[in-house]
């Protein structure tokens, strides 16, 4: 499966799978979007509006985080049993008929917004592939290289495949427990309930 479509698929699965509930929004945490890497699902529920969740896969779809970033309206949160909140995914869909220049402009706008919050990207890729028919656009922030990621280790902004509709620009933020979360995800549920 294309890694760039994963956030959209997670959002769709969560939105379709369960009903949401509106909750009173509490004070923000100091992490990305006003959440905190390592927080529990219950803590996340207390500060966001939950649209759906999949407890078996430890995923939650939320909107209205305490400190939103313009354009990223819904977040898919991944929790580890021990690590708590370990990954945040979100995406901006581009119109079906978006031209490359519009996609690039939106990507650059989102990169500027994230730069205001996290500092200059540690890595920026703007490269032609497939005989220059498609551009790869990636901005990556790494805490290990001085990015101020509010408790996260990495943030990656990337443009999804352009031969798939809708085209999306996705943001993935990983925390200290991300590797542990991925390992738990691969192992699947271990309890008999």
Image (tube, rainbow, N blue to C red):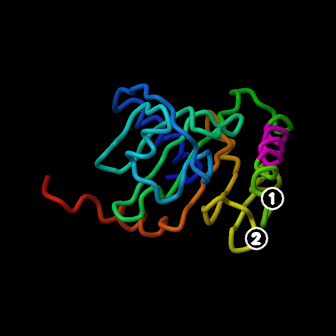
Q: Secondary structure at mark 1?
A: loop
Q: How many marks?
A: 2
| Residue found 70% across the figure and 52% down from its top | 157
Residue receiving disc 1: 119
Question: Which residue ends up furthest to the front in the rendered image?
Answer: 27
Which residue lies under the disc numbered 2? 146
**Residue at point 51% right, 55% down?**
87
Q: What segment carries the magenta color?
A: 103-113
Instruction: Give the answer, above or below, for where 123 lies relative to 105.
Output: below
Q: Which mark is residue 172?
A: none
Circle 1 residues within 10 Å: few <14, some 14–19, many ≥20: some
Instruction: Report if residue 160 lies within the magenta region.
Output: no
Does residue 149 lie above or below 157 as drawn? Answer: below
**Residue at (30, 65) in percent of width and height:** 187
Disc 2 or 1, which lies upstream in sequence? Answer: 1
Please identify the quarter of the rendering in which residue 130 is found. Answer: bottom right
Foreground of the two, 142 or 45: 45
Q: Is residue 47 left or right of residue 186?
A: right
- Are the two marked residues, 2 and 1, in contact with CB atoms closer than 8 angstroms? yes
Name above or below for residue 109 compared with residue 79: above
Location of residue 129 in the rendering, given as x and y in whole percent from the top left corner: 77, 57
Whole-percent x, y for residue 109 in the image: 82, 41
The 10 Å Cα crowd at callout 2, few under 14, some 14 to 19, many 20 or more, is few
Residue farthest to the left? 192
Image-based side of 71 in relation to 11, left or right? right
Does the magenta run of residues contain 105?
yes
Secondary structure of the residue carrying numbered label 2:
loop
Report x, y in % for residue 4: 59, 50
The answer for how far apart the CA atoms under marks 2 and 1 are is 8 Å
Q: Main secondary structure of the magenta part?
A: helix
């Amino acid at each position: 499966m294309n890694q760039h479509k994963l956030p959209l698929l997670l959002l769709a699965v969560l939105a379709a799978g369960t009903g949401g509930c509106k909750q009173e929004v509490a004070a923000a945490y100091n992490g990305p979007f006003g959440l905190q890497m390592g927080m529990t699902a219950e803590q996340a529920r207390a500060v966001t509006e939950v649209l759906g969740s999949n407890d078996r896969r430890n995923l939650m779809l939320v909107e209205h985080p305490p400190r939103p970033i313009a354009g990223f309206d819904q977040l898919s949160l991944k929790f580890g049993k021990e690590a708590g909140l370990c990954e945040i995914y979100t995406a901006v869909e581009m119109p079906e008929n978006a031209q490359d220049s519009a996609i690039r402009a939106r990507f650059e706008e989102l990169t500027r917004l994230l730069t205001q919050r996290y500092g200059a990207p540690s890595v920026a890729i703007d490269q032609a592939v497939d005989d220059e028919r498609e551009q790869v656009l990636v901005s990556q922030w790494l805490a290990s290289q001085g990015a101020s990621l509010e408790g996260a280790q990495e943030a990656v902004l990337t443009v999804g495949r352009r031969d798939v509709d809708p085209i999306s620009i996705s943001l993935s933020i990983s925390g200290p427990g991300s590797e542990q979360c991925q390992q738990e995800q691969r192992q699947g549920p271990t309890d008999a309930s």
